[in-house]
Image (spheres, rainbow, N blue to C red):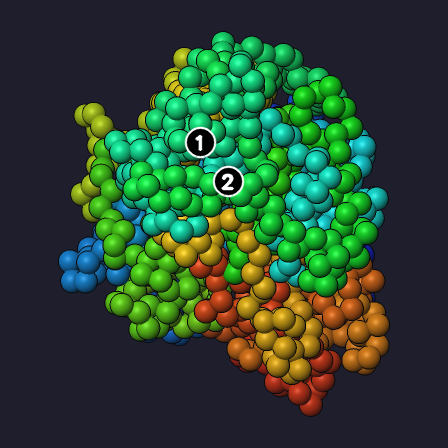
Amino acid sequence: MAKLTMSRRSFAKLSLATAAATAVAATTAGAALAEQAAPAQEQGDVKRVRTCCRGCGKMECGVWVTVQNGRAVKIEGDQSAFASEGNCCTKSQASLQAAYHPARMYHPMKRTAAKGEADPGWQRITWDEAFQLMATGFQELIDKYGGECLTTFCGTSRNWCMQSAGGILYQLFGSPNGHSAYQICKGPRHVATAWQSGKAYSWMAQEDRPLVYVQWGGAQEMSNYDSSCRSTVNVTMQAEDYIIVDPRRTNLGKESKHWLPLRPGTDAAMGLAWTHVVIDNNLYDEMYVRRWTDAPFLYCADIEPTGFMGADPEMGFPFPVATRLLKESDIKEGGSPKRFMVYDELAGTDDAHPLRTNDPSGKLSYFDAETMLWEGETYPEAKFYESPQKNLVKGTVPGRIAYSTDFSGCAQELLPAISGGPFEVTLKDGSTHSVTTAWMEYADLCAQYAPEIAEGITGVPAAEIEEAAKIYATRIFPDSGYGNGGINYSLAIEHSANAVQNCRVFDALAGICGNFDTPAGQRGGTVGTFPEQFAMMSEAAPFKQDATKMLGIDKMPTLAHCYWGDAQHIIKAMNGDGAYRIRGGYGQSGDFLNAPNSKACFEGMKQMDFFAMCDLWFHPGTQLADVIVPAQHWMELDSTRRSQGSGGAEGAHCRCIEPPADTRFDVDISIGLYKAMGVPWALGDDPWPDATYNLNQMAQAGYGMSWDEYKEHFQKNGWTDCKEKYPVWGTYRRYEVGMMRRDGLPGFPTPTGKQEIWNTLLESYYPDERYTLPTYTEPPEGPVANPELCKEYPYIMTTGRRIPVYFHSEHRQLPWCRELWPTPRVEINPEDAAELGISQGDWVWIETSRGKIRQTADLYYGINKGVVNCEHQWWLPEFTGLGKGFDLVNVNTLASLDNQCPLCGAANARAYNVKIYKATPENSPNGNPVPCDTDGTPMIVSCDDPRLKEWLPNYEIRKEA
């Protein structure tokens, strides 16, 4: 009898090898009970299906799923999947339990109990009934209060289930108020780069193997965030140098040569300090700075900002650009507002460089943002050379690099000044003014964060800051023509009241060091035929939202240029504190647990008139729903897949096993809702087809075949290398050759056509120039901004530590995962713990003025004294009480609803002050330091808890109709 099974013990072995982490001894250890493998089967019919794992939400790891007699029994890495390099982590393995979990949602249901009851009294209904109830519930609210009274909850990108953040929000509801994890997860960097250079050029091409690997505020070796665990480990082993910038030493960080443990929330100060070192030591790419940034543009402080009608760099809608950058229209009647003036260092120096005729001084030339050409320039023919990057993954092509151009194409040779000055200019009214370059303005700002100054802000010694900056910026192989690699910055940068500015600091730093759209640099999202998000909206319905009704836009006008509603204003409006009340909503692929102050969000959801949820699981959010509908697991569906980051892969999710009979694919659920609300999904004879319609469209567009034919192609040939198939992705320095702009002209898709260190969009909205340059602002709670608060709450809390068996709020109900990591942990420096009388594994209280939670103490010298690191998005699926214990253990309940990035609204989800103390029977509810359900039952705290057995796979329940 042949067995093809993954056992609990092999899973645990894999978890330990991947994580190199030891579980906290929170309670007395015991023998694991949830260790049974799938029942042994005869060999029978066995097949291996090549597909893409979505055990987490942020990496397209290629895997093989072995199916025996129709049942998935093994998941293993696909070695041919070059972006993931055969990676197959514990979350992927645990999918064998998730797909067959007895507590999945298996049928559409409606609530019969009153809202706010822990048990909603679910009653099974048909899909037609579910669609009709949802359509009626939503339409009644739209008719009575307007579409803006509805919101959606959208989480992380399983790319086929994002309609709630797209078509459902904008086409069905007509609401601008989407509550999206995107606002705190990749979104801030995407808008920051869209406004400054090019949307999503925050992605670093890790797969290109940087020579100096900088990991800033993240631990991809644990999380598969943007790149796979295996790829991350390989990169660090092959890099010439490895730097981590993080308040805590990460698991892989022990291999780094340089660890800069900065105070949480001071990332921009550190980035500006690096930039100062780069400028002060002339380590920047001078030609790039002069030619491709707005650094040489002249700034006149004492004129009124003027400009032209621009367009949002990504969404295209018009907005008035108004800037104090000097333009031809400022110095000449009838001059163009799109010609930006520079000071020509060569003009008037000899006969070959006569004075110019643009102004009385003869020293001014210009860049024309209409034609994307410098004065008198004829743009040279593009030329390329093969990337010399080393250690590329086997089976991938190196790509081609556009040669850097200079100013030799200008009729009169030009050298725009970036330093020197100030210079004197005469305006068209005859007045004279002093001007300087945008570069000098930025250099002066960065000098305020020189290493010796930044040391006092970040807590990192000046010498270590300077050394790390020089290692990053000093080219190891200058002949390559580009820098050592980009900056792999992660979510800590975005969970900040300075989120957009943080991201702008890194975007500018990478650019000036020669790492913008270069091998291993900041490359942007992979370009292919398949979209990053599959079937996100109808092709046949218009958007109906009114952006002027977006909650919070009066406070943050740049929200109009973001891709979400503001969560904090939405939560307040749920609770009756807003311009109008949020009265209903729809959740899909996400929940409220990522919300800034998730407890306030939960309270607001209780007050909704109508709420529906599409999910795989029962969780705290479904307890408040009126209707729930069951989605399918990643092994049960077909979908396109393209690397969301710079991984460069294109492939597919292929159905491995038949789905439970009464579940549906997310796309088909969305199409059913469109039909029920009378809104077409597709053009043509059938306005409401199934998802195969969209799959066939994509396969035909990219590969000239049907979806079924493409799946056969994928099974045989594996993942597509987009650098080989798509020239636009196989080309580096696309700004040189017109591949970054919709009009095909060279340059960047910004109002000036340059990487805008001096940002004209932000200057236009904030003419006091407080955000025009990438700046640092102290965290709103901390030793500088609020020293009085620190007296009562002396510890700085960070969060978001990656856990090898969990992904955000997911997998706490999977036995293999939960027995390895049964309780939430807070990392504390052992010296702090000794002072507080806290030992390893003790339950402790973490408290702010907004509330308190409990987690278990994990003593760790890899975090500085005075800093603690809490785990995020915990909830307790074993609980039956309302909320399922999230309010007892979820750190997001402690965050402020008021502290946020003023430009995109991102929550200040970390770097705030807490106090921490031991939980005892005397200070704990139920006389028990362990969090308990409403009936007093403690949570699962060890691998021998018999409740874990209740979650073992049920292979029969899937067959029910």
Horizontal relation, residue 76 to residue 644: left or right: right
Question: Can you give x and y, in whole percent of width and height, for residue 690 in the image?
Answer: 32, 32
Residue that carries the numbered disc 1 in the rendered image: 361
Q: Which residue is mark 2?
A: 423
State the image coordinates of residue 883 (x, y, percent, origin top left). 49, 70
Q: Residue at x 39, y 54 (%)?
A: 766
* Position of residue 478 measured from the top left corner of the image (x, y, whole percent): 74, 23
**11 or 650: which is nearer to us?**
650
Query: Mark 2: which secondary structure?
Result: strand
Report crowding for label 1: few under 14, some 14 to 19, many 20 or more residues within 10 A (C-alpha): some
Of all residues, the one furthest to the bottom in this rendering is 922
Above or below 785: residue 562: above
Residue 912 falls left or right of residue 438 = right
Give the crowd class for mark 2: few <14, some 14-19, many >=20 residues within 10 Å: some
Q: Image quadrant for the N terminus?
A: top right
Q: Regarding mark 1 in the picture, which secondary structure is present there?
A: loop
Q: How many marks?
A: 2
- Residue 930 quadrant: bottom right
Using the rendered image of the protein, determine whether residue 716 is visible from the camera's viewpoint.
no
Q: Residue at x 51, y 49 (%)?
A: 773
Q: Are marks 1 and 2 in contact (CB under 8 Å)?
A: yes
- Disc on res. 669: none
Closer to the camera in the image, 345 or 399: 345
User: How far from the left and from the top, in percent, is residue 5?
Assistant: 70, 38
Q: Residue flagged by tag 1: what amino acid is it?
A: Ser
Image: 398 above or below 261: above
Question: Which residue is at a point 48% across and 16% down the rendered structure image?
Answer: 412
Q: To which quarter of the image does residue 349 belong?
A: top right
Please give the name of the residue rendered at 65% of the width and 83% of the height, measured from the top-left corner. 792
Mark 2: which amino acid? Answer: Phe
Residue 735 visible to the viewer: yes
**23 left or right, relative to 438:** right
